[in-house]
Image: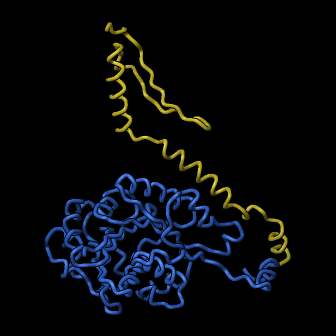
Chain colours: A yellow, B blue
């Protein structure tokens, strides 16, 4: 019983574990919402290609669209080689 | 007047959807409404056994949607509570057997015959969930105060919003003593994370298991704290919108606190 008592008085890890839970949850929920499903990403890619193609000839086979996640910021990165400028 | 369809859902399994459905359904019936509770968990039915109606099943919701029987043939009447009916799930069918179109057609009929139609959604966000929410006028999302249930609740809340349904939250299995010790997220913490209106707060309660053992409605156990909480939720759904949300508390006498500190009681 004495060791139990000692443990009770010294252990702090269980206490306030809820604050840890809350912090982790808030982060996870933000992070979860940045996830985008494949079909939406494909739609977005097609829309972007359409717009860019009005101004440039681009290589549609070697472009990429990605979401890059950082510690506190996330970025949408679209990368495409330009073949030609379109004369308007 | 047309009845109201309320879906009870959670994303995560095992957080108390079925208990909530049977309790809120029973409480609404005891308040004088004509109520049907429907088990939408095709292939894994449980609402019938929680309500103690498992040996009276003849037809089920799949039979109703596929026009194999009338609603009145599938709806089992509870003998203890007037005006409470259960339409069970099918145990043998695949969960993809229902379509949203079929459910919508039946929902229209149900609204003419009942004041409240409570749908017990299956866990998950697949077909069964879609079928449960397609005709819903209101949604109750239920979660327990743990990280996985809250995260799943957030996902479900987002899906409901995208269907133009504004859900309300039930926090279930609150342990006030642990909340007081900082071991468990309080309902306020949960609300900070989820930003949603609350429908009710339900404490952890031993009566939930024992009344399910007996197939007895929880709300008939007068002593049950969880039963009382579900009744209050039902009263709010029934129009008493200004009935305050009761926060589960624990009584700590001085002696209890001292003995706890020294490890005599848990």
Q: Name the residue: 40% across, 86% down.
A: B215
* Residue B152 picture location, percent across and down: 48, 57
Q: Is residue B17 above or below residue A43?
A: below
* Residue A84 picture location, percent across and down: 36, 8
Q: Name the residue: 37% across, 26% down.
A: A48
* Residue A53 picture location, percent across and down: 33, 18
In-image side of B123 versus B131 (left or right): right
Asked whether the viewer can see residue B248, the reply is: yes
Q: Name the residue: 52% across, 31% down.
A: A75
Asked whether the viewer can see residue B209, the reply is: no
In-image side of B17 versus B97 (left or right): right
Q: Is residue B201 above or below residue B153?
A: below
Numbered label tally: 0
Name the quarter where the C terminus of chain B is drawn.
bottom right
Name the quarter where the N terminus of chain B is drawn.
bottom left
Q: Name the residue: 66% across, 80% down.
A: B250
Residue extending farthest to the left is B68
In-image side of B253 versus B116 (left or right): right
Observer-nearest residue: B31 or B26?
Answer: B31
* Residue B211 picture location, percent across and down: 46, 86
């Amino acid at each position: 019983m004495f060791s139990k008592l000692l443990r009770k008085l010294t252990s702090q890890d269980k206490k306030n574990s809820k604050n840890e839970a809350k912090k982790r949850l808030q982060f996870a929920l933000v992070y979860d919402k940045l996830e985008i499903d494949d079909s939406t990403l494909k739609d977005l890619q097609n829309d972007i290609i359409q717009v860019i193609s009005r101004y440039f000839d681009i290589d549609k086979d070697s472009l990429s669209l990605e979401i890059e996640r950082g510690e506190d910021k996330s970025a949408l990165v679209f990368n495409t080689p330009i073949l030609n400028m379109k004369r308007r | 007047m047309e009845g109201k369809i309320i879906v009870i859902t959670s994303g995560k399994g095992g957080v108390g959807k079925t208990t909530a459905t049977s309790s809120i359904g029973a409480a609404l019936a005891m308040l004088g409404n004509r109520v049907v509770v429907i088990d939408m968990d095709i292939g894994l039915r449980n609402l019938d056994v929680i309500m103690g109606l498992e040996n009276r099943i003849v037809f089920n919701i799949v039979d109703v949607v596929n026009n194999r029987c009338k609603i009145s043939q599938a709806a089992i009447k509870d003998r203890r509570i007037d005006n409470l009916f259960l339409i069970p799930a099918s145990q043998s069918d695949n969960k993809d057997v229902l379509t949203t179109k079929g459910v919508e057609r039946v929902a229209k009929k149900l609204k003419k015959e009942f004041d409240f139609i409570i749908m017990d959604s299956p866990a998950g966000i697949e077909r069964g969930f879609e079928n449960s929410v397609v005709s819903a006028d209101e949604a109750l999302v239920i979660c327990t105060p743990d990280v996985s249930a809250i995260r799943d609740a957030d996902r479900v809340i987002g899906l409901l919003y995208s269907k133009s349904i504004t859900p309300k939250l039930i926090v279930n299995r609150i342990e006030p003593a642990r909340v007081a010790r900082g071991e468990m997220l309080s309902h306020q913490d949960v609300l900070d994370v989820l930003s949603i209106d609350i429908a009710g707060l339900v404490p952890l309660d031993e009566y939930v298991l024992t009344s399910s053992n007996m197939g007895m409605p929880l709300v008939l156990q007068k002593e049950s704290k969880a039963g009382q909480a579900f009744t209050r939720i039902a009263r709010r759904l029934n129009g008493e919108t200004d009935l305050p949300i009761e926060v589960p508390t624990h009584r700590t006498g001085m002696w209890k606190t001292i003995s706890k500190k020294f490890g005599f009681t848990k």
